Amino acid sequence: MDKIKTRYGEFLPCSDASDLRKKYRCTVDHHKNGNLKSIYLQDPEVVSLPEGDFQAELMTFYEDGSIKRVFPLYGQLSAYWSIEDEQQGAPYYDFRIEGEVVRIRPHCLFFYPSGKLRSITLWPNDKITVRTSAGHIETKLGVEFYESGSIRSIEPSFGTTVKTPWGIVSPYIYRPVMFHAENASMTFGEDGSLSGFSTIKTAVEADGKVYRPGGYMQPLTVSINEGALLITGNNIKDIRIDTSTAEVRFL
């Protein structure tokens, strides 16, 4: 099979799935406009991007041809090839997050059309700790960023607690499939301030009324706006609490 030309170079798509770990999937896919949508490579290759040089076995693209996601490895899990076998060969990279260098073995890198990094998703059983305005937070899923590079959201490890002006919260949401790091339970404004959280453990008390999550499948989501909290979830829809007049506590 001939190499496929992209704006990032030419790459050889997979033509032989006889390898123990190769996926049986379409090796080259296109958008409706004819532009490349994804390419599954015969062997992992290095792709040079504005954010750095990364190994890629699967790449996906936006309709305009800019790269969307990079999977350094994309093997088929089976009784003969485990997730531990797969991630053992995954490369590590150094990323600068909120002024600190963090060494990460990414399962997937997600990019904005501009080429800026949008999220880093970790391999199962990996974890990292990153600095935020709410303190250093450990995550086993990954981190999402604004195009400016500041943290947009993060999924804290279960049991993490965070201090706020209204008390201690435990941000965490249950996901049946932890596939990507976007839209996680703890969110931040572009200025770095905590802008909200979803929780399956923390309740909100406001003027004597208590709003509780409904368990693993019905988290409580609290958005922190200037002078107000907005609460949704567990049959609660858009309850606005004025923090300048209401007595608020996180329980």
Image (cartoon, rainbow, N blue to C red):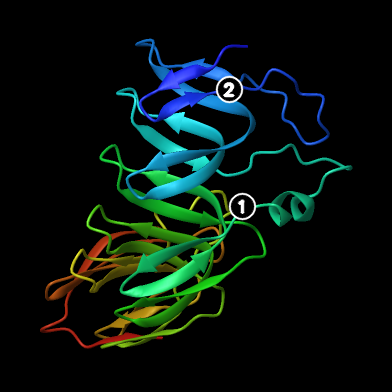
* On-image quarter of the N terminus: top right
Q: Quadrant of residue 97?
A: bottom left
Q: Please say whether residue 172 is visible from this viewpoint.
A: no
Give the residue pinned by disc 1: 176
Q: Residue at x 56, y 49 (%)?
A: 179
Q: Residue at x 17, y 84 (%)?
A: 246
Query: In the displayed structure, does residue 223 sit left or right of residue 125?
Result: left
Residue 160 to residue 191: above or below: below
**Gap in angstroms between the C-alphas marked 2 and 1:** 34 Å
Given residues 47 and 88, the one toward you in this image is: 47
Given residues 128 and 217, the one toward you in this image is: 128
Local SS, label 1: loop
Residue 37 to residue 251: above or below: above
Amino acid on which disc 2 is placed:
Leu
Image x and y of residue 222, in percent: 31, 68
Give the residue pinned by disc 2: 12
Q: Quadrant of residue 223?
A: bottom left
Image x and y of residue 82, in percent: 80, 49
Given residues 77 and 105, the one toward you in this image is: 105
* On-image quarter of the C terminus: bottom left
**Residue 87, numbered circle:** none
Image x and y of residue 164, in percent: 30, 85
Amino acid on which disc 1 is placed:
Pro
